Each structure stands twice: as C-alpha cells, then as structure tokens.
Amino acid sequence: MTAKLRIIIVGSGLAGLAAARILREHHDVTVYERGGTDTATGGQGICLFSNGVKILQTMGFDRARVGAVPCYGYRALDKNGNQLQDFPVDFKAKYGADTLAMKRSDFRDELLLLATAPSEHLGIQGHPAQVIFNTNVVDIDPEEASITLEDGSVVGADVVIIADGVHSRLRHRIVGSDARAKKNGMTCYRVAVSAEAVKHTLGYLPAWWDPQTADGRISAFQAGDGSNRLIAAYAIRNAEYMNLACVFPTRQNRGNVLESWYADGNRREMIETFDDYYEPMRKILGIATEVKVWELQDIDPLPNWNRGRTILIGDAAHAMTPMQGQGANMALEDADALRLLRPGMSRKDISSVLEQVDGVRRPRATRVLRDTRVQAKDITLEERIANLDYNCGYNGVFEALKAMK
C-alpha cells in the first residue's frame, strides 16, 4: 500500500477546512488552529458562485444542511427602493452549477463537518482530519515542511499548507518579505436581519425581499449621488434572513479595531451613513441585532505562493475585497488544486507539485484580484458580464491543466 502523505494545515478558516476535506481521503491531515472552535464564525452572509459550488459538489456538500439559497441574477435599485435594472442569470445552465448564498457560520460548520466526520458517514475512504484548536503555530521551515508551536515543540510533515488568513503571521516565510494587507478606503457594515423581525417592524416584506417578487436576485441599492455608497442584499438560511452589506467611504482611520471582517460595528454610524435611504431600509438597519464592520482591504499579488514543501492558500495568498464575491470561491479553488498531491510522492515530487499548483492558481487569482479592484469603480455591464464568465467558468484544477497545455 502506497504511503499516505502527512499534511499539516495551519488555520481552520474556509480555505483550511476545504483543503482538509479534499486531502483527507488519501492523506493523514492535521489542522492547527490558534483560536477556539468558534473562530471567526460571524453570522453574516457569503455567496458561493458557480465556480466554487462545482468544487463543493465533489466534496459531499449538503446545501439543505446549510440552508443555502440559490441566486438567479442581479437587480439594481435606487436609495428609494425603485428598480433601475434587472439582470437575470441562470447560473446552472450557463456555468454548470447554481450560485448559492448562505450564512457564513453555517458554511464553516459544514466544512468542519466534511473535514472531520467519520468517513462512513460521508461515504468516502480515508480517515477524518484532526483539528487541534487553541494551538498557535509561531514558525515554519518551508523546505523541511515542519512547524514550530508556541511551546517550542517542532512537528514535522511531508507538506505544510498555510491558510492563516489575510493577516497571516507566516506568509513572510514563503515570500521573503512582509507583504501586508492594504485598506482601499472603503468600509463595509455587515448585518443579517430575520424576515420575521422585518414583518413585525414594517408589517410586510418589501418587494426586493419577498420571495414572491424578489426572484432570487442579489439586490444593490445605489445612493446615486456620487457618494459611492451601496447596500447589497441577498437572502440566506432558507430565506429566513437577509444579508445586508452596507459599503461607503471610510470616515476616519479606526486603528486595529477593523483588522478583521468580523469586528463589532457601530450601529449608529451605519444608520447615520444611510439616513437618506428610504424609510423601510432605515428601519431594517435599525433592528439589526448583530452589526459587524470591516475596512475593506486586499493584498498586492505575491511573487510566489510556494517554497519547498510549503504553500499558501486562501486569504493568506490572495486576500481580496468582496466587490465580486470571489474570495471564498478562490479558497475553494485552491483546495481543489491540492488534489494533485498523491500518496507516495517523494520530497522532490511534492515540491514540483506545489510549483504546479502555484502555476495554475496564482495567475488566475491575480486576475480575479485585479478585476475585483476595477469592480469597485464604474465599469460597464459588458465588463461585469465578462468577469462573471471568467470567474464562474472555472471547472477545477484538472480542466485548468488541460487548458494550459
């Protein structure tokens, strides 16, 4: 029997857990997480586009378990709730899979289950990944594929995967420089509001919310006054909740409080920023029970993701703003690319495969990052559609390799 690879993953976010699920069938996987079991599990929404969903479908992902809501296009509205434009998209027919919206915490719970549940429950081979919480990795040796824990102990492996997020503490060991996230001057308030609470407050659901009239659209409420303010809304958790992302130019530098996407936000500032939006929207923002805030940031394209037998994935490799909703999808694509790691590989083989993963993933993620930066500006509908085609048309690492030949 060919020897399984011993694989260490640093970080139990979306990228780390997706990689653990992909790799557990053929390898022995251990995930080290410096936080607890509830790490970064805010209740706000996340969109998985067709490119990500195609990969999830190969992992045993259960959309019913997470209450995923299919999206069927986009709708532009003004700040008074008047529809300006409707753009239907049949994602499944066009790209091979639905686009699904869900609560971020529900999605992470699903990935944790897929990474750690007994193999017989999932109908797969291999052993569950082991997730070790409250254990901080303070250093790595990329060439030797070993990690150093906070207590000074060293753990060796065949492969190390760094998935410790946008503010990665280990990225510099791969790229040789201190590549840090840069804020782009925009702030995003994120809230999830229940349909029941809105019906109680307004007495009804607005047309853009009511499932009978919303038509599964992602709705974008534009201020239309040059202030660059926007509220994006889509249904999550079986349409029992609506995710609202309220984006506007940052008012002042708040320091470190907003270094993560799940920092607690100032409800008053959010309401004041959108106080000229129509009354139903103001009331909906006013009843939000959990307000999270994030100063939007990304990382300039890195010169490399891999070194020796170690590789960066997820936000540690390519953090981007949510303006295209592609961050988590890129993480799933990264995890999928790790299928190229096979049991019995030599040290040299492993280094070559990680170089190959870098060659497939880094150019694509770089283009998506650059398109995302442009998306924050005024681009044509045709340009947006072209971006959607590029993003959602991806069919996994093996198809990508064929296309490169």
Image: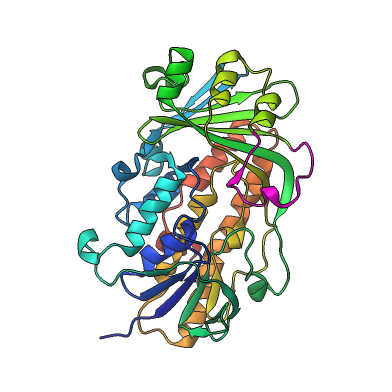
- Which is nearer the eye, 243 or 81? 243
Magenta portion: prevailing SS class: loop
Residue 248 position by quadrant: top right
Left or right of 202, for residue 265: right
Does residue 261 show up magenta in the picture? yes
On screen, 43 above or below 180? above
Quadrant of the rendered structure where residue 346 is? bottom left
Is 112 in front, or is 94? Answer: 112
The residue under the point 52% across, 32% down is 289
Do we see residue 330 in this rendering? yes
Instruction: Determine the residue positioned at 41% across, 27% down.
Output: 216
Residue at 59 percent of width and 50 percent of height: 368
Residue extending furthest toward the right: 252
Q: Which span is picked out in magenta?
A: 250-266
Please give the count of numbered marks on the rendered protein.
0
Q: Quadrant of the N terminus?
A: bottom left
Indicate the position of residue 126 as horizontal and vertical percent values: 27, 72
Q: Nearer the viewer, residue 190 or 18?
A: 190
Q: Where does the image place residue 106, in percent across and percent down from the top left?
A: 40, 46
Is 234 part of what is drawn in magenta?
no
Query: Is residue 205 visible in the rendered structure shown here?
Result: no
